[in-house]
Amino acid sequence: MIEDLHKTRPCNKEKQVSLVVNVASECGYTDQHYRALQQLQRELGPYHFNVLAFPCNQFGHQEPDTNKEIENFARKTYGVSFPMFSKIAVRGTGANAAFKYLTESSGEEPTWNFWKYLVAPNGKVVGTWDSTVPVEEIRPKIHELVGKLILGKKDEL
């Protein structure tokens, strides 16, 4: 019976709201952002929401360490439980494909560390914020999207 249900209905567990952030360990915004991002992840993740962290050394060379060192720092210092990806470029000709998509979709290119893209479950960028905007300020928008996603999943049942 469960197998039949899966045959007739696609499984939507992969649909999530994502907050994509280029992170840096030695930035003035590091402490405030990592703490707030982890709080969001604790509150809302990992089934309906994830912070997706992409270390980047393009701004002020504030992410000089190796991928392993960066991850160890974030996990030990801030208890980070969200996905940490390999260090990448987020702007310019060498930008990672994901950030090229985010930039093209939103019309906004990161100008510093902790640039934030809010991505709806359908893959569309629904908001961008620079590092001066605290996570707490965008929290209501994230909660609204996650709420809509949960209600949509409930309706599918």
Image: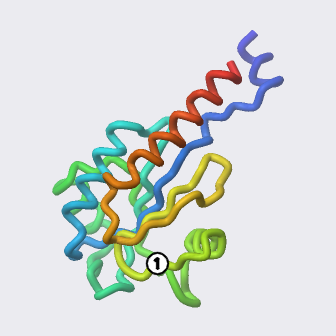
The residue lying toward the viewer, choosing from 39 and 4, is: 39
In the rendered image, which residue does mark 1 sit on?
110
* x and y percentages locating residue 136 in the rendered image: 31, 52
Q: Is residue 80 left or right of residue 126?
A: left
* Residue 153 position (above or below residue 50): above
Residue that appears at 65% across and 75% down: 104
Q: State which quadrant residue 55 falls in.
A: bottom left
Q: Is residue 50 left or right of residue 113?
A: right
* x and y percentages locating residue 132 in the rendered image: 31, 71
Q: How is the image coloured?
A: rainbow
* x and y percentages locating residue 94 in the rendered image: 55, 87
* x and y percentages locating residue 102 in the rendered image: 59, 69
Quadrant in which the C terminus appears? top right
Q: Disc 1 residue type?
A: Pro
* Residue 152 position (above or below residue 30): above
Residue that appears at 42% across and 52% down: 51
* Residue 65 position (above or below residue 155): below
Labels in figure, total: 1
Q: State which quadrant residue 14 falls in.
A: top right
Quadrant in which the N terminus appears? top right
Residue that appears at 37% across and 50% down: 82
